[in-house]
Every structure is written in C-alpha cells, then in structure tokens.
Image (cartoon, grey):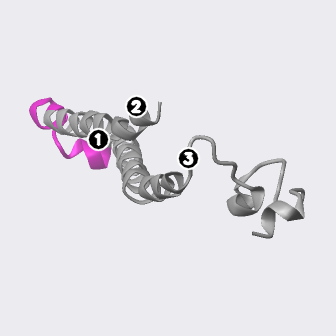
Amino acid sequence: MENIIRHGAARCFVFQGTVLVTGVLMLIVGPLGIGALWTNWVLLVKTLLLFILMGLLSYVHLRLQPKIEALLAETGPHTAVAACQLGSSRIGFGASDWPRSACSS
C-alpha cells in the first residue's frame, strides 16, 4: 500500500500538467483566446485552484514525504512507538495519557 501511495505522485503531476497544457491550448485555439483567463472569472478561479493543487502536491511530495519515510525507516513492522515519540499528532490518546515508563527511555 505504501508503494502505491509513494509512486502515485508522478501520476498526479502528469495529470495536472496535462490539464494545464490542454486547457491553455484550448484557450489559444478556441474562440475565447488566452485573454479569457483575465476576463472570465470562472476560468481564472479554476486555473488558480489548479496551481494551488500543484503547489500542495509538490510540498507534500518533496517536503513531507521524505520526513515521513525517514521516520518509518527508523521503525520496523513490529516496533511499538510510544505516544511520547509521536507528540501531539495522535488524536484521542496523547502523551499525557501514556504510561510514564514508556516515555522515560
């Protein structure tokens, strides 16, 4: 499952790039022209949303994913991770609820 998620970003980059290129080509070739990006607010909003999605995907793929992989590389499949190591990222069962013996190492 992790490999599917890890390698899925390339498909997303290809898809988003294809949407961008074909959208711009349709504007250039079509009757509206490229100037419609500035005069048609729907096209402008969709283009801005596409750039926001591309930016978020880039941030997650290039910044967050390597950090997650580094954390997972330190643990094995049967390694117990204490709540004090996870910090506040756990929901409903924080480090304050974890037995102190697990956090003292």
Q: Position of residue 32 (x, y in %)?
A: 19, 34
Check residue 34 for magenta coloring.
yes
Mark 1 — residue?
13
**Figure quadrant of residue 26:** top left
Mark 1 or mark 2, earlier in chain? 2
Badge 1 amino acid: Phe
Mark nearest the camera among 1 and 3 is 3
Badge 3 amino acid: Gly
In this rendered view, identify the residue nearer to me: 12 or 99: 99
Q: Which mark is residue 96?
A: none
Q: Which mark is residue 76?
A: 3
Q: Give the secondary structure at mark 2.
A: helix
Q: Which residues are magenta?
A: 26-39
Q: Residues within 10 Å of mark 3 (few under 14, many from 20)?
A: few
For the point 64% across and 47% down, the residue is 79
> How far apart are the two marked residues, 1 and 3, measured between alpha carbons?
30 Å
In this rendered view, identify the residue nearer to me: 19 or 13: 13
Q: Residues within 10 Å of mark 2 (few under 14, many from 20)?
A: few
Q: Which mark is residue 4?
A: 2
Q: Position of residue 51 (x, y in %)?
A: 35, 49
Mark nearest the camera among 1 and 2 is 2
> How far apart are the two marked residues, 2 and 3, measured between alpha carbons?
19 Å
Q: Give the secondary structure at mark 1.
A: helix
For the point 15% across and 30% down, the residue is 31
Q: Give the secondary structure at mark 3.
A: loop
For the point 86% across and 56% down, the residue is 98
> Where, quadrant-wise, is the C terminus in this rendering?
bottom right
Q: Is residue 41 above or below residue 105?
A: above
> How far apart are the two marked residues, 1 and 2, measured between alpha carbons?
15 Å
In this rendered view, identify the residue nearer to me: 41 or 80: 80
- The answer to whether the residues at label 1 and label 3 have Cβ atoms under 8 Å apart is no
Badge 2 amino acid: Ile
